[in-house]
Every structure is written in C-alpha cells, then in structure tokens.
Image (spheres, rainbow, N blue to C red):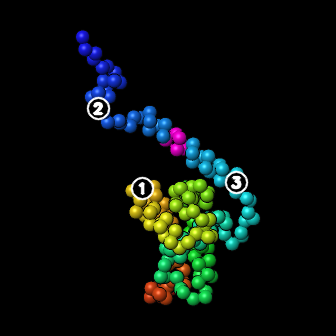
Amino acid sequence: MPVVPTGKALHTVLDPSPLITRRTLLRVGVAGGVALFLARWLYTQSSAPTLPDARFVVLDARARAIVNAIVPVLLEGALPATPEAGAVRAEVVANVDLAIAGLPLEARTGIDQLFALLAFAPSRCLIAGVWSPWPEASFASVTAFLTRWRDSRFALLQSAYGALHQLVMAAWYGSPNAWPAIGYAGPPLLEVG
C-alpha cells in the first residue's frame, strides 16, 4: 500500500514554493524592531555627551554634520562658488534646524530617528553605504547614498530621501540669499490700514 503524505508534507508536495506565513512575518517584524531598538540604545550609550549649541533648536552636532554633508550634494549648482560658500552652507544648516523645529512633534521624532540611524556608524555603513564619518564623507559617496535612497524600491528609504530633500530645499529657497539667482524679489509688503 502506497504512503499518502498528510499535513505539512502534503502541503510541501502540492505547493513546493515556500510561502511567507504570518508567524514568519511576525518573527521578522519583532526581530527588526528589536534590532532598531538595540541600535538606538547603542547609539545613545556610545555617543559622547556634547554641549548644546544655543544657535540650534533641534539639531545636535551629529545631525548638523549629516545635514552639512548632504547640503552641497542636494544644492549642487545652486550654492555660490565664492569664499562665502561656507557661511552660506552654515546658514542652510541653521535654516534646516528652524524648519524641523516648526514641524509637529511626531514629524520631529521621525526626523530625529532618521538622523540617529544615519549617525550610528554601523547603520550609516550598512543602510546609507557611507563608510567615512559624515564630516569626512566624499561628495561622491554622499551623492551615491542619496541616489540609492531616492531610487530605492523601498518606500521607507524613498520617504527618508524625500524628507531630507524637502528640508534642504525649504531651508535654501526660504533664504534671501537664494532669491536673486531665481529672480524672486521677496515677499510682497502688506499695507495695514
């Protein structure tokens, strides 16, 4: 008499392609959550305390270094190529800080988590592909990182790129330094009374 497969063996015989089960999905989700929690905890435990800079409301030194590294890439061709370029870039970083400070708490928390992820060396290397610390990152490596995130098949990376892009663009084009190049005379004066 032939042996007839039953239960799990029957499923394997009938459908040899492994399907993801709810249990597997939950395990992966829990493992991912634990990994992110541990990365965040290690980041806060290993980071040296820094004195707060009174000029900035939201961005700490690590987040400012990240923004300072991505500004020249996102604003390539828009930033002036003059000796004052460093001061203009610093103004853009300060304006990003102000833009983030004006966002709702939920959005600020998400952006803080994004900067924490990018500042933590292992996740910076694995997720962003930037192997040097942000102040030493090359223009090419930052460009490759932003391009990968912009063109990613993962919506989470695309939205993280979009957030960084929108913050930098708002910080730059909201500044009077950018207006002459685009022919904008500034906001109209409103007469009261």
Report x, y in % for residue 70.
54, 70
Q: Which residue is mark 3?
A: 46
Cα–Cα gap, marks 1 and 2: 31 Å
Q: Is residue 20 left or right of residue 70?
A: left
Q: Main secondary structure of the magenta part?
A: helix
Report x, y in % for residue 144.
47, 67
Q: Callout 1: 10 Å neighbours few (<14), some, many (20+)?
A: few
Amino acid at dot 1: Ala
Amino acid at dot 2: Asp
| Quarter of image, res 58 | bottom right
Q: Which residues are magenta?
A: 29-33
In the image, farthest residue toward the left: 1
Are circles 1 and 2 on residues that touch, CB within 8 Å? no
Q: Nearer the viewer, mark 1 or mark 2?
A: 2
Q: Callout 3: 10 Å neighbours few (<14), some, many (20+)?
A: few
Q: Disc number at residue 15?
A: 2
Q: Which residue is mark 1?
A: 155
Amino acid at dot 3: Ser
Q: Up-down: is 58 above or below 87?
A: above
Are circles 3 and 1 on residues that touch, CB within 8 Å? no
Question: Which residue is painted at 54% across and 87% down in the image?
Answer: 81
Instruction: Tell me which numbered mark, 3 or 1, is placed earlier along the sequence.
Output: 3
Question: Which residue is painted at 29% across and 32% down in the image?
Answer: 15
Cα–Cα gap, marks 3 and 1: 30 Å
Q: Secondary structure at mark 3?
A: helix
Q: Secondary structure at mark 2?
A: loop
**Does the magenta portion include 192?**
no
Q: Nearer the viewer, mark 3 or mark 1?
A: 3
